[in-house]
Image (cartoon, grey):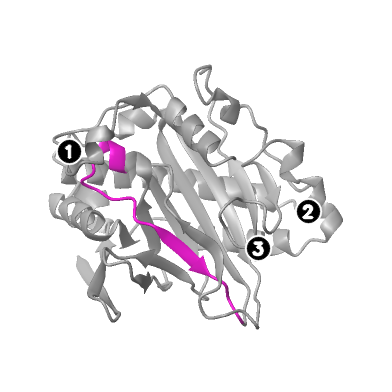
């Protein structure tokens, strides 16, 4: 079943589809796959319901996030990313390049056994840092990671079908995926201007991102006319968006839409992002004819080399 949520601005009427994945999960319903790809091609985003992830799993990870960021400075410092490497551990406000100064992060990778030693392998070697005083934290994170990996595989199978590819096209290329999870805590700032940003304009590196939000809101996407559209939280739904890797795979048919997060004024905000891409040794080969001049520049590149290139370019 498809619902379409319409958000108005002065430039244009924009829609982000609400897609019920339950029929796809039951019988690989082709109509659902087409709807998902259609939403991605128009906006780069969709809401999904019927995803099969227990509400308790989502509630537990959001509660784990609240408890983590409520710790004192010394306990947060004990799992600071400098003890492991960027993208694993606690990242204080203002550290990530190109973003505002009013959000903090906890990053963790997924434990995926591999003997891969090619480009990007250093990211596999970064250890996770777990807070010793929060015994329920790691189990909540790992349950959520497992649920997200399964959901990402389902979503990528649907995208494959929607792009008229074999259903397992992406899934077989995700045997040892790049899978990164990020807890985000946005600190309220009552004196902030209406357009103050906690996360600046960016697109994601990977194939897809799945986002769980609390009820505060603040996510915006950029439409083709350059206007910013709100993507409010909807109970029981995840927000999912395409990343740069999927744009390359689809030869520009699916955009990695720029998005940002406004600074909350009254309430702190929590969200959980799960970034998912193909295995590091997989060659990203653009499929079909390029849709524009930029897409003509997409040369084949392995996932590991691509991720390493992006991290290096952005100074991470």
Marks 1 and 3 sit apart, C-alpha to C-alpha, by 38 Å
Mark positioned earlier in the residue sequence (1 or 3) = 3
Q: Taken as a whole, is the magenta stretch helix, strand or loop? A: loop
At a point 51% along the width and 18% down the height, the residue shown is: 116
**Label 1 belongs to which residue?**
290
Where residue 145 appears, as percent x and y from the top left, is 52, 46
Name which residue lies at 30% across and 65% down: 223
- Residue 303 found in image quarter: top left
Task: Please say if 25 is above or below 121.
Answer: below
The answer to whether residue 133 is seen in the rendering is: no
Can you identify the residue that label 3 sits on? Answer: 101
Q: CA distance from mark 3 to mark 2?
A: 17 Å
Q: Earlier in the sequence, mark 3 or mark 2?
A: 2
Which is closer to the viewer, label 3 or label 2? 3
Residue beneath the point at 32% across and 34% down: 171
Q: Which residue is mark 2?
A: 76
């Amino acid at each position: 079943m498809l619902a379409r949520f319409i958000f108005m601005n002065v430039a244009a009427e924009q829609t982000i589809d609400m897609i019920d994945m339950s029929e796809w999960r039951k019988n690989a319903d082709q109509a659902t796959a087409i709807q998902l790809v259609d939403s991605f091609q128009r906006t780069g985003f969709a809401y999904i319901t019927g995803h099969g992830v227990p509400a308790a799993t989502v509630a537990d990870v959001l509660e784990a996030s609240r408890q983590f960021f409520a710790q004192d400075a010394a306990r947060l410092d004990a799992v600071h990313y400098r003890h492991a490497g960027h993208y694993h551990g606690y990242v204080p406000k203002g550290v990530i390049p190109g973003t505002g100064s009013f959000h903090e992060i906890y990053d963790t990778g997924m434990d995926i056994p591999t003997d891969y030693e090619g480009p990007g392998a250093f990211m596999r070697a970064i250890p996770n840092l777990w807070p010793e005083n929060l015994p329920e934290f790691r189990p909540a994170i790992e349950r959520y990671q497992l649920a997200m990996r399964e959901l990402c595989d389902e979503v990528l199978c649907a995208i494959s079908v929607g792009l008229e590819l074999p259903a397992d096209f992406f899934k077989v290329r995700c045997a040892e995926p790049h899978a990164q999870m990020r807890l985000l805590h946005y600190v309220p700032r009552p004196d902030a201007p209406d357009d103050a940003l906690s996360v600046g304009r960016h697109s994601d590196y990977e194939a897809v991102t799945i986002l769980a939000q609390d009820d505060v809101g603040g996510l915006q996407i950029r439409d083709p006319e350059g206007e910013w559209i709100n993507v409010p939280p909807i109970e029981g739904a995840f927000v999912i968006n395409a990343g740069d890797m999927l744009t390359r795979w689809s030869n520009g048919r699916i955009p990695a839409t720029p998005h940002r997060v406004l600074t909350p004024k009254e309430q702190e905000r929590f969200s959980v992002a799960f970034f998912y891409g193909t295995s590091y040794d997989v060659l990203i080969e653009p499929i079909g004819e390029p849709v524009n001049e930029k897409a003509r520049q997409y040369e084949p590149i392995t996932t590991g080399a691509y991720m390493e290139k992006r991290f290096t370019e952005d100074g991470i």
